Image (tube, rainbow, N blue to C red):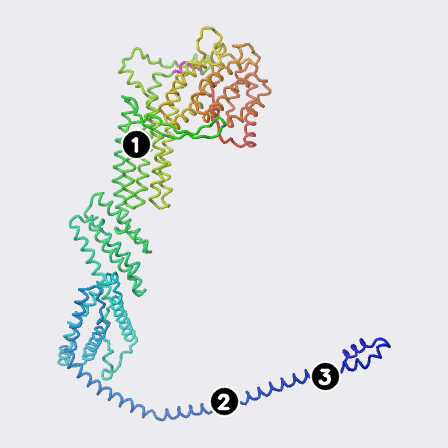
Amino acid sequence: MSDSTLSKISELIKLEDDLAKIGTIRQQFLKEKSSVDVKLSTTTQVQIDAIMNNLANLNNTSAKLSSIKGSIGEVQKIHDQTISSVRDYDTIKKITMVNQFLSQVANLYEDISGFKKFLDALNQKISIELENLQNDLHYPLPNFMQIHASFTQARNFQDYLEVYSRNLTDDLQSIVYKIVSPMKKTIKLFDDLLNEGIQSLTEVTKVQNFECFFKIIAVIVWEEKQDLKFSSINNLHMNLEDAKTVNYKDFRGRPRNYKKFFFDKLRANLHEIFDACVEYYGNDKVQVYNGLDWLEEELKFVHETLDKAFPSGWKVSSFIHDVYYNRLHQFTMDIINTDPPAEDLLTILSYDSKYGKFVSEFGVQQKSIIGEELKENVLDDYLKNITNRMKEWNDNLIRQETKTFTERVSAPELFPHSQNIEDLDINNNVITMAIDINVYVLPDFKIPLTMLKEQADVAANSNYAKILVEVIENWSACYVNRIASFRELVDEEMDRYMSVFNNDRYLIKESKAKRLFRKKPPAPVDLDNLSPEEQSKLSREGLIEYLAALANSLELSDDMMMEKFAPAYKEKVHTNYHARITKAFDVASESSSALISEVLSAISDIIMNDLTPALCKLFSKKWLEDGSSQTGEPTTANLVVETISEYMGEMRQYCVYDVYELMFRIFLDNFIPTYIRIGYENILHGDGKRIDPHATKKFKSFSEGISRDVETFFNGLDPLFTKKDAEYFFSSLHAIEMLAELGTCDPNSIQEAWQHMVLPKFYDCSVQYIRGVCLCRKDMDKSQVKRLVPVLQEIKTEYHKQVEPPQTTIFTLNDFQFQD
């Protein structure tokens, strides 16, 4: 008994009470035994059945192997019989060859006797088919395949007779020649029919006559394969069959090259079409380029439709494109060799670009119809012609503008101008206002842009981005030269003006000792003793008006150039050229903007020159006492405001707003540091009163005088600004206003004032601004100031490390300097 059985019995009988269940347990074991016996019997039967099936399969395999063994024996028997019967097969082969020869002789007799008649009938069929195709593009060539089959049979017969008559006597060869000579006419007729079909391929396809098209192509393809078969057999030396037994109906003695014939005739036809176009225009051959729309339509049809119908390996579209390109190239070279004028060269260049772009749409590599090397020469010649012409125009314009500007016979021209400007409403929200004004401009100020438009439009029509870009670049260079000429002209005119009206003699910039030993300056020109003609030679009137007209002209031109011309011409070229066009216009714009700033600086210098006699009294006893008398005499600040208002009021009437706005900023950045500088120098070298921080009496207090001037400037000049622009004016005015605090505060608090009052308002303020006011104070000596300057510079450096520059930078005190 197994351990598992004993374990199970021990589980069932553990106690004495379990002995009473022995009968039940016995019945349970009997049921389990019966179940196991049934399963065992079923499994055993399945295994027995499988064994019997395998034995049956083994018996079948044995029978098949016996059959195979018998078959191999039969094969061996047949092999032995074949080896022993070789002589019988040789006899049969010879008898067969004799029979074939007798049949060949009989067939040759029949074919030779009927060859002429056969060809005459074939010639008639070919002629009829040719005539029908010439008269009707819709004709489907219904007999063409039959004609080709008969024609091929005749050519095969001809080849057979010619090839195998080479070993015959001369007499027999002459007889063969007479037999096959009528074939020449048939070959010519068939070639004419095929040529007509080739020339008509495009047209029959356009009228949907695809049956005609495919029959012609099928014949060419078949002939190509037969030529390939012949060449392969010939190269492998497999054409050694006996002439007596060869089947001459399938014989080919040489390649017939109908595929080459196809492309040769197609090329000739394309040349004929192009030459007909050239002849149409007679002697005016350049007009051919304006009448090549048919060529573009033809190439488009070939690429989109015709090419797909041909076998892919033929590359018909590339072939047709190359044929037309070569013919067009030769035609173009013939014209160029006649040394045509620039206009004809541009026509050629324009079509060259147009042609290149057109064929590139179909994936064809662009090739110049001129030739790449010669094209560069033609482009260079054309550009040289255009640039020389443009330079000549620009030089003439500069001479005319110089004459107009220097002579100033009449006031500048008025030009109506509309623009939108930004301002602030009462709630400091940005608003836009439209203004219309007549501004001063130079006569014909639009000529440079007109010259650009004329030449650039012509260049753009050439479809050559290189021409357009170089025309723009050359125009930019001419524009920069014109700006440089104006710059010299402005400098010369300012020298003439200042030679007469310069008021620097009123200023005291040096100490008494230096002035004592300084060489005396030349005496000022006495205008009263000069005739009007002599005065006009020095400086004609109207300089400020013409300077304003120049600034307006440049500003208006710059707006049109950058807003209209630059985007328009960039759209006409590939993005690869955008950077060059942008750079050309930027260079012109930058030079123009720089001259505008210089012109406005010149106007600012003229205004400051007129202010000099009044400003020379700054920080003097008279300045401190301004307003104390009852005579009603205007104060220094009132005189300054009156002069500025007169100049800027006129500027506001005839200047473009952007010019006026920039003019006022340049003037403020000039006027305010000049006001401070002259005041410092008056104290240090002239009649100015050193600043007494403790003076409190009215008309003796420095801070009182500063506050008085600031208030006068604020009230007098504020009307000249929009609310938005006034912010810069107020910020600049702080430079003067802070002098009251810096001149009267405790010396020990100057560093704190520099850090917390000056630098937040003037981020990059010069240390000389503080140094000057300290030197002017009574309670500070030079040694104190000398020790203070490095400390101030260190504070400025640390401030810049900790604080970012403001969005709107005030430049008023950035470069402040004075003479001490």
Question: SS at mark 2?
Answer: helix
Q: Which amino acid is tagged 3?
A: Ser
- Horizontal arrangement in the rendering, residue 606 relative to residue 232 (left or right): right
**Residue that carries the numbered disc 3 in the rendered image:** 34
**Residue that carries the numbered disc 2 in the rendered image:** 64
**Dot 1, how many residues are within 10 Å of its Cα: few (below 14), some (14-19), or many (20+)?**
some
Q: Which mark is residue 446?
A: 1
| Camera-side residue of 619 and 817 | 619
- The residue at 28%/71% (across/down) is 225
Percent position of residue 123, x then y: 16, 73
Question: Which quadrant is home to the N terminus?
Answer: bottom right
Percent position of residue 411, x then y: 29, 22
Mark nearer the N terminus (1 vs 3): 3
Mark nearer the N terminus (3 vs 2): 3
- Residue 639 among those drawn in magenta: no
Within the image, what quadrant is residue 582 found in?
top left
Within the image, what quadrant is residue 181 found in?
bottom left
Query: Spatial distance from mark 3 to mark 2, Cα to Cα?
Result: 46 Å
Query: Spatial distance from mark 1 to mark 3, Cα to Cα?
Result: 122 Å
Tell me which segment is drawn in magenta.
503-508
Q: Are marks 2 and 1 in contact (CB under 8 Å)?
A: no
Q: Is residue 597 visible?
A: no
Q: Is residue 615 visible?
A: yes
Mark nearer the N terminus (2 vs 1): 2
**Dot 2, how many residues are within 10 Å of its Cα: few (below 14), some (14-19), or many (20+)?**
few
Q: Which amino acid is tagged 1?
A: Lys
Percent position of residue 299, x then y: 27, 56
Question: SS at mark 3?
Answer: helix
Up-down relation of residue 188 to residue 421 (above or below) = below
Q: Are marks 1 and 3 in contact (CB under 8 Å)?
A: no
Q: Which amino acid is tagged 2?
A: Lys
- Horizontal arrangement in the rendering, residue 585 relative to residue 48 (left or right): left
